[in-house]
Image: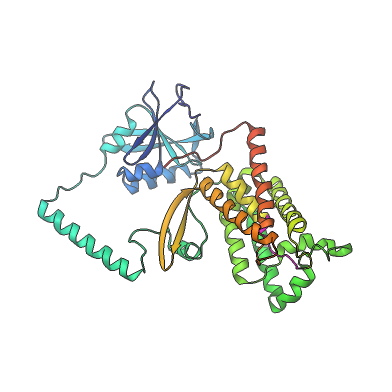
Amino acid sequence: MAGCPRCNVRLIKRKTPNGVVYACPKCGGRNVAFTVLRRAGVAPGFMKQVWQQCCAPDAKSHLRCPHCHRRTVRVTMGSGDQDLSLDVCTFCRAVWFDGSELKKVLAARPPERELSPEMREKLALVQIEMEQRLHSLDGGLLAGEGPPEWWQWGPALAGMPVEEESPARESRPWLTWFLAAAVAMVFVVTAGDLDEAVRDFGFAPSLSTGYGALTIFTAFFIHAGVFHLVANLYFFLIFGDNVEDDLGRGLFILLLLGSHLAGMALHAGLDPRSDIALVGASAGITGVLGYYALTFPKARLGVFWRYAVFFKYDRMPALVYLGLYVILQLLGAREQVGGFGGVSYLAHLGGLAVGCLTASGVRLAKMRPPEFVRDA
């Protein structure tokens, strides 16, 4: 439940044309996400100054965030003829406005030029023409739809999710970076003879006895090809940093290990092809995905849907993406149990189960709501 940091009463959720705003019925305070402020027309320069002050070394903590209950950062901004003292949550990326502060910020927006009816008609025609040209060039992808950063187009078109809005980190994900680098280095070393590496270090349940039992661990670092490696590391890097930050390095490595072992165990127990080696870090990484989606359920992810040669870009909360991902894994696991396919969906489901259970356990232990509960 989101509560007013001033009055400690429940905030009212209000939907506006620009997104969701949480309002206090007693003091009139408002909690507004950065994205909603941008849609409302607040100057980008103003938002940039707010964030720069939040990241300053001398930034001071103040109120508790209504959602995640972390300490907000007090920043002082000029608005018109007077200064405003705003409280910013760097984790949720939202601003708490006391009383009439929000009205003052919105009133400081640059005025919109009034266009003549003729000019509006000309602009509308130009916009329609441009959309038609872009539509013909991109094979069906509508103008303006797609990932916000240029480098995200590659993973998105390859079918992987794009993290558009994510929780702010409080520390650098050194362990995530180290493990990703180690996995990449192992691939470079074994790329000369991948078949031999898979045979020697992959996990084949019926052959993994004696010293071969260690392959249940070494399989994590072996990958069958470039795309297999890149896809796994991409998922690991975009989700692992926030999970490591939330859990701490010790629990994070235990989550990875537990998810990996659970995935290997489910694969060994249900896949009928026990003599075929299994390689890759995806079981552990899907555990990270499960933890991320339950801990930050409203973090925004973008995905491309493909219909023949047409693409449609869509945005969804992480929890919705997890639900779709689970459905795909269940469908794949059904085929795998019958002895078909070259992907171990069972390993993914085993890792997901550990990640989701860990997230639920941490939540209960800390008696906290899901983080990053921003609606816009």
Location of residue 98 in the rendering, given as x and y in whole percent from the top left corner: 38, 28
Location of residue 3 in the rendering, given as x and y in whole percent from the top left corner: 48, 27
Any part of residue 284 in sight: yes
Q: Majority secondary structure of the magenta segment? A: loop
Foreground residue among 275 and 80: 275
- Quarter occupied by residue 49: top left
Residue in the image at 43% along x and 46% along y: 52
Residue reaching furthest to the front: 338
Q: Quadrant of the C terminus?
A: top left
Foreground residue among 293 and 37: 293
Chain part drawn in magenta: 276-283
Magenta residue check for 9: no
Location of residue 19 in the rendering, given as x and y in whole percent from the top left corner: 36, 40
312 vs 72: above or below: below
- Quarter occupied by residue 28: top left
Q: How many marks?
A: 0
Any part of residue 148 in sight: no
Residue reaching furthest to the right: 210
Location of residue 207 in the rendering, given as x and y in whole percent from the top left corner: 83, 66
Residue reaching furthest to the bottom: 192
Q: Is residue 334 left or right of residue 60?
A: right
Q: Is residue 75 left or right of residue 64?
A: left
